[in-house]
Amino acid sequence: MPLAIESRVIPFALRGTDGATHRTEDYAGAPVFGVIFHCNHCPYAQAWEDRLIALQRDYAARGVRFVLINANDPVKYPADDFAHMTARAADKSYPFPYLFDETQEVARAYGATRTPEVFLFDRDGVLRYHGAPDDNYEDAGAVRHHYLRDAIDALLAGTTPPAPQTKPVGCTIKWR
Amino acid sequence: MRIEFFYWEECPSHPEALARLRAVLREEGLDVPVEVIRVETEAEAAARAFPGSPTIRIDGADIQAPEGTPIGLSCRVYHTDDGRVTPLPTDVMIRRAVRAARAGAAAPPAVPRDAAVPRPGEAER
């Protein structure tokens, strides 16, 4: 089961493609903190990737912080190994850390099952949105419901996201 | 015309892709069965040279050349001509492949991969 709405953020310390270890406490005080399970190989993750990058850039000045976490087994999916993660983060000029959950413990703790899958926390580290970035993985121009953007706007305004939970859509996380 | 639709259950897009395929066949006036084939194991994926779910082959030709995509149980990446990545083949891709097969072409052209073959007033999906 995924982490329930109103649960507290689950601490982690994971290695990023930038060479640093990123801890949840590094993001304490951010008005909005997004933990997003992601990977390289999945077409759903790829389809939404530019939108996540745009969102992070749009909201960075307001203190919104995302981290992307890849938990896939790189033995089964070599495109998701750390070297490929590093290359992709550089190619796409990721404006957020891209972290490797090598043991898969973080993904399991969060109850994540898909890529992408968003867990969005408020300033107090309370989960306020869980689900998909929006309602159209195929075409950014055809999106009708901007779930993640709306949730960020709501949290920045001090209100509750209009849709706190949506169904994550994407590839399954590749367990060992 | 032989039409095969291969899918892996873990990718959520296959029902929509199958519906899209059947709609295109209907619109093209083709009353041909679609062989729906579930791929469940890596061995099966290897045996069928399955480059990911969903995969559509018409008379043995993939509707979009997989171009180096690894064989195995995975969700498939499709590229549209406007540079988008999508887990689903578009109507345009399917229609082009159907028409190529009807015209007796050995395989749809690899480039451009998603050249428009629109119906009047149709926008690419």
Image: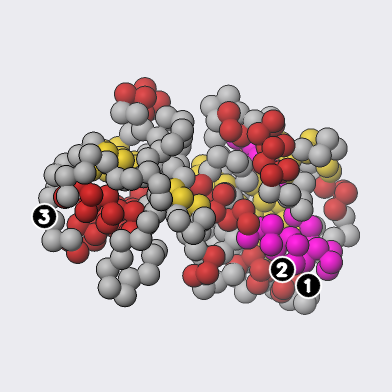
Mark whose residue sits in front, 3 or 2:
3
The answer for how far apart the CA atoms under marks 1 and 3 are is 54 Å
The N terminus of chain B is located in which quarter? top left
The residue depicted at 35 percent of the width and 61 percent of the height is B116
The answer for how far apart the CA atoms under marks 3 and 2 are is 49 Å
Q: Quick check: is B86 in the magenta stretch?
A: no
Q: Is residue A21 above or below residue A50?
A: above
The answer for how far apart the CA atoms under marks 1 and 2 are is 6 Å
Q: Position of residue B37 (x, y in %)?
A: 26, 38
Q: Secondary structure at mark 3?
A: loop
Residue type at numbered disc 1: Leu
In this orientation, does residue A111 appear? no
The residue depicted at 36 percent of the width and 49 percent of the height is B14
**Looking at the rendered structure, which numbered label has been put on residue A156?**
1
Chain letter of the residue carrying label 2: A
Q: Does the residue at mark 1 contact the one at mark 2 (Cβ under 8 Å)?
A: yes
What residue does disc 2 label? A152
Q: Position of residue B113 (x, y in %)?
A: 40, 49
What residue does disc 3 label? B31
Position of A35 with respect to B93 (left or right) is right
Q: Position of residue B91 (x, y in %)?
A: 33, 59
Q: Residue furthest left?
A: B31
The residue depicted at 87 percent of the width and 48 percent of the height is A25
Chain letter of the residue carrying label 3: B
Residue type at numbered disc 2: Ile
In this orientation, does residue A133 appear? yes
Residue type at numbered disc 3: Asp
The residue depicted at 55 percent of the width and 71 percent of the height is A145
Q: What segment is highlighted magenta in the picture?
A: A51-72
